[in-house]
Image: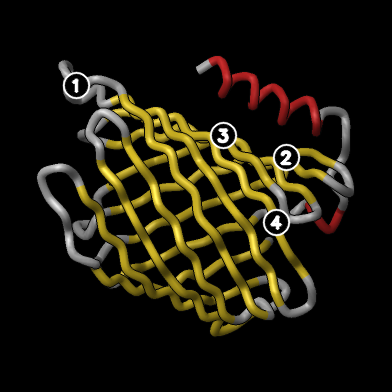
Amino acid sequence: MSKSVALLLLCACLASGRHVPTRARRQAGSFTVNSDGTSGAALKVPLTGNDKNVLSAIGSADFNDRHKLSAASAGLALDNVNGHGLSLTGTRIPGFGEQLGVAGKVNLFHNNNHDLSAKAFAIRNSPSAFPNAPNFNTLGGGLDYMFKQKVGASLSAAHSDVINRNDYSAGGKLNLFRSPSSSLDFNAGFKKFDTPFYRSSWEPNVGFSFSKFF
């Protein structure tokens, strides 16, 4: 918990006392619908910053295939003009408990055609819905690639201690439409997990994501 609080203070200190440039003062909202019936919405609102760093409030909500809330998150994100970023989020999952997550990304390469970033995250899981269940950690990372802001691919993996679970995912993205104020993407991918007692097969999933900039 102390490391997460320190990160939050660091984000605030980096951006405090600065004004967000006009071009950066934009709210970003997105909505995603998946083939398995799940969906999600997210909002990102710039709070303060300068020409190099912007601190934003972030929030999201995920819904299951019965359109009931499956997770709700809120937090802060610090974005750098060179494509690097940090975020701190708290998540409430009905029927499970709470999560506190820290994530970071580093842009490895960028030009007019190619963009490659590495990401890593750490999550503290508190399954308060199960009184005798211990808290546990999830650590993970991955790579994101985009070609001309049109076609993208991603790979990620994560490990949860205590329950000794590994999660893997691979996906692709195709931008169908883009304007200065909105974007529509088609997403497709596969995911699987394994534990000492069970291994799932690769499960496919497709969906559409619409983003709006205000």
N-terminal of the two: label 2 or label 4? 2
Foreground: 159 or 65?
159
The residue type indicated by label 3 comes to Leu
Residue ID for mark 1: 133
Task: Classify residue 77 by image quadrant.
Answer: top right
- For numbered disc 3, what is the local secondary structure? strand
- C-alpha gap between disc 1 and disc 3: 24 Å
- C-alpha gap between disc 2 and disc 4: 18 Å
**Which residue shows up at 68% across the image and 50% down it?**
106
- C-alpha gap between disc 4 and disc 1: 38 Å
Residue ID for mark 3: 88
Task: Classify residue 133 by image quadrant.
Answer: top left
Residue ID for mark 2: 55
Q: Residue furthest front?
A: 196
Tell us which disc is closer to us: 4 or 1. 4
Residue ID for mark 4: 107
The residue type indicated by label 2 comes to Leu
**Which residue shows up at 38% across the image and 46% down it?**
158
- For numbered disc 4, what is the local secondary structure? strand
The C terminus - image quarter: bottom right
The image position of residue 27, as x and y in percent, is: 67, 54
In the image, which disc is placed on residue 28? none
N-terminal of the two: label 3 or label 4? 3
Q: Are marks 1 and 2 in contact (CB under 8 Å)?
A: no
